[in-house]
Amino acid sequence: MTQLPSCLSTAMNNELQIVKSESTSQCHHQAAIDGLRTALNAALIGKSDVVELVLACLLARGHLLFDDLPGLGKTTLAKAVAYAVGGKFARIQCTPDLLPGDITGFNIFNQRTREFEFREGPVFSDVLLADEINRATPRTQSALFEAMAERQVTIDSATFRLSPSFFVIATQNPVESHGAYPLPEAQLDRFAMKLRIGYPDPQSELAMLAANVGCQPVTLPMPRAVIEPSQLQQLQQHVSAVSLAPCVQQYLVDLAAATRNRRDVTLGLSPRGLLIWQRVAQAHAHLQGRDFVIPDDVQHVALPVLEVRLAGDFESSRQVVQEVLQSVEVPVFTGRKSR
Amino acid sequence: MTTGTTDLGSPGSSLVRMRPRQGQRCQATESGTLWLATLASFALTAARIESTESLPWLLSTATVYLCGPWLFWLWLWCVSPLHRLTSSGPLVAIVWTVSPLLVEAVSRRLGVGDAPELVFLMCLQNAALMAAALSQRHHWQQLACLLSAFLALCAVVIGTMPKVYVLAGLFGVLMLWWLMTRYWERVQKTVAADRTDRCLPMRSSILLAVLLIALVLLATLGSTSASTYVLRGFMPSSGGDRWSDQHARSGVGDGDAMVAAQDEAMSFGPVESELFLDSDMPSLYDVANDMYGEPVKPLKKQRRAIALASGNVREPESQVSKTERSGREFSTVRQKVTRPQEQLEDRSAAAMLYVVGRVPMHLALERFDLFDGRTWDRSGESELHPPLRLETENGKPWAYLQRGGGSAILRGTQSHALKIINLKTNRIPSPPHLTAVHVDKVDQLDFFGWTDDSVVQMPMQEHIPQLTVMHLRSQGAALQALRDGDFTANLPSVGGLERPAWMARHLILPADGKAIHFLASQWTRDIPRGWRQVESVVSRLRSDFVLDPDSIVPEGCQDVVEHFLEARRGPDYLFATTAAVLLRELGYPTRLVSGFYAREERYSRRAGQTTVLGQDVHVWAEVAIDGRTWIPIEPTPGYEPPREALTWVQQFSLALNHIRRWCVQQAGWLLAAAVAIGMLWGTRLVWLDWSFIVLGRLAGFGNPIRQVLWTVRLLEWRARLAGYRRPQTETISRWHGSLLLGLPRDVATSLQSILRCAERILYGLPTSLAPEQRTEIARTRSVIERHVGIACYRHALLRCRV
């Protein structure tokens, strides 16, 4: 398979920039999207590509996992997202002694009323920031399964609905760090994507330093809420209506099959992961100003979507994803005829 | 095949690791299946060659039948397994399977055809090949293997040539490998998937067994006539009692092949034909006279004689019959023979003999050593021959003649079979350098012997019985060894007086011909003494003289050679005579040989043999290179010289020489073709680009959506021509968008616009285009046609490389 030349990647980025500037005046949610984009770019300087993917994840109603070294801005970006989306915000600082009840909530006996009453945990919020999630024990991490997948929690036989726009942003340190537990595959599959932020470029670092002069660390500016949770739900509903040609859906299915047919991948893409991939591709297409998904969208979001959920005996998941993409034919002229 | 590492201690984890790869294709077994089918197809083609009427037709159809599935397989290998056309595999297989029937229907109208059973086997072959081409699915693979095995079996049954068995052996080896591969593949999957596979599919096995039993019962319990009546409609075959096929390979009952024997006498066996019983068997003398005309009786000359006393005159002990006497000589002065066309046709029916084996070939029957200027005669002095030796090989008695066995220049062994039909002689028609003779069940040495003119005969027979099949082994002469030196040095003192009698006989010249001497020395001037001189004389005769069977020597002519040299035309015996006389003049012992020339044109591919007719009587000469070995020479144009024994290197250089000569002859055309091809190649990008633009314009005429798509196709085509072909896993906007960096602003906008438009058409919801959009598309397309050329892609390629 031909490796994509580096100049092509550059050209691709440039082209995307041009495409991005395409007028999308038809979409009345564009202002909200632009507001979110500006807010996040202000919080994390020089990482517009990460911001785009965060937005895509948000619009696809997926949960987000940041995985990177300490100090690269994971929590800053997560908090920025949480503030920008508005609504009720909750935060858990995960530690080894954190209990499931500390996340979901628990029943407590009220001496005065002589009854058990339910104390809501942090999951009863619109945006939940689980900081350093892999420092909690697997037992505690599992408390998030139901909440993330079904947006509800069941405590003592009683089921409680969570906010419709419930959105988990988790950060984790690389597993090799001391005192970290690996996230179980079942939980990883519930995240829409895993993002790495990476070091900023020198210009961005300069800008960051300049912006920090004269500021108290405790009073770092956090964006105001750009949209309301209800508006986010409308936006998510709108994005889910972005159309996919059958050939593009077939392309997704072929790619999923390709992940499952690899010898070095023990856990291929699940149907849930496939659904999430489609939603993220739809969101990406919408962010690019299109009302239909093209194979470029699928390819563009492939790495963060697949990286979080593929498991096996491989060194680099980036390499695996690249090989998967290069093993499936992109529908071009065949797609139209089959429609 | 890798099985991975299986940790027996923790089966769960190993199972996860060794999860079967359901969708993955194994190229080894797939191509192995195709090779199986290909080998079986080769075996069938080899069997077909034995009975074909037209070899080019057979080879071309076989090539097409073979290449189609291979190309289809390669195509399937290249495209995704989910390509929509892969689902049409069964349809393609069916069409390919029945195609031999259609081809046969057409080819029979053109006069060539195959036997029905071969046509059905070709259908089977095509089914096997196409199933093998579709072997990415496992059930097709199994079907292909089964069909191939059946095909190979059929080919072995119907084929008789050894190469069929060799191919079948190869097939067996490959089949073994294939089965092993499949077995391990299966074991791997079974272990990996933690499931048990039944090796034998129970349901289908039971069904198959029941069907087989029913068929056997039908064949055995049902009356023979009824079952054959039932089966006749399903199993068309050769022969039969009411219907026959002219393309049948062989016949049963009164099939065509047997019927033909009454007209053409091509088959042997217990046939109730009176063809041979009625035919008169000509003697050698008759055959020569029929061909060349009756010899002219020499004018009686009155000579002065001294009367002898009656006691000194010895009466001959026995009366020499005219025929026998006539058979001992060969007159070169003959009457003109008229050959009406009807007679020729009649004669063509009466085959003298059939030759199985490589032709053209000279078959010697008589040799003459004395020449008096008009007539060749035999001196009757026999040469010394080593004793015959009988050896049994594979239970068959072979009479070894040992003649020439010691000569260093005789190499290799050629085998021929002769079927004597209509020849009244006890002499065995002998190829040059005959070494061994085998006649079935004749294991007595005294059945064979030498005549006084060094021809092998069956002395106890008046003539060789009809329908006798004789197997002959002979050797070829490596003339290159002769050319390198002077072979006459081996001869006992060429110019001396003490030359042996045999040599003296073969050097006798009819008269003191100065003209002959002059001509011989002129033709061999500057040529070193030896075989090159012989070849020079032969080649001069072949090139400067014309074969004319009707040009005869006048009755009164006393020196036919002189006459021939003046007339520069004549029948073959005059060529041979002249060659012999010229060579004798040069001091090479030479003799005249008469016999048959088995012509290549008379080879019947179907019968696998060459017919030798009465008019194939031929005369040539032989030159002695030592006391025992005589090398035949062919001075008559139109007759192939006896084949040399060549080494591989010599054959290769000969072929190279042929090619070189052909190239020199066709130099003009070749040069023109090379220039044309060079120009086409040099300008290929231009005209390929133009052609595609024209094609795109035609295809997109009046339809803007098609215009957009054909513009994208044009971009793809140009990228391909520039060597920057888009990989199938890359998207169009990503690949062609890489050009945006190096393009002027307006062209980049046009390119971007057309790509975006194409994306909407290809992946978006169906939309209709406004008139202004149509105009814009037309403009964009023309911008791209003009400005986004092959050079842009080349620059992009260069940028990537840098």
Image: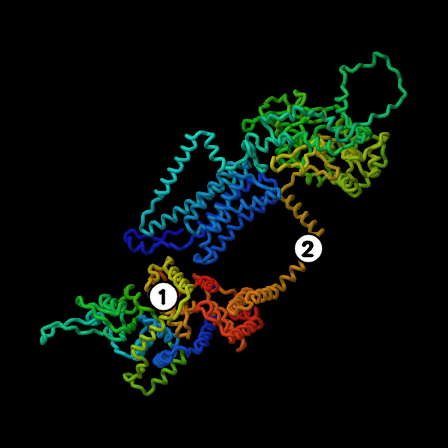
Tell me the chain of label 1.
A
Q: Can I make out residue B498 in this image?
A: no
Q: Quadrant of residue A287?
A: bottom left
Q: Secondary structure at mark 2?
A: helix
Residue B626 as seen in the image, left or right of residue A275 = right
Identify the residue at image location x=76%, y=15%.
Answer: B318
Identify the residue at image location x=34%, y=53%.
Answer: B5
Kind of residue at badge 1 = Leu
Q: Quadrant of residue B345?
A: top right
Task: Residue at the far right: name it.
Answer: B304
Kind of residue at badge 2 = Leu
Residue A212 is situated, as x and y percent measured from the top left of the image, at 34, 84
User: Disc 1 marks which residue?
Assistant: A306
Tell me the chain of label 2.
B
**Of residues A241 and A137, which is closer to you in this image?**
A241
Residue B190 as seen in the image, left or right of residue A19 = left
Q: Can I make out residue B634 in this image?
A: yes
**Of residues B479 and B696, which is closer to you in this image?**
B696
Label 1, label 2: how far apart the Cα atoms are: 60 Å
Residue A318 is situated, as x and y percent measured from the top left of the image, at 39, 66
Image disc number at residue A194: none
Q: Secondary structure at mark 1?
A: helix
Residue B93 as seen in the image, left or right of residue A269 = right
Q: Is residue A238 above or below residue B531?
A: below
Image disc number at residue B670: 2
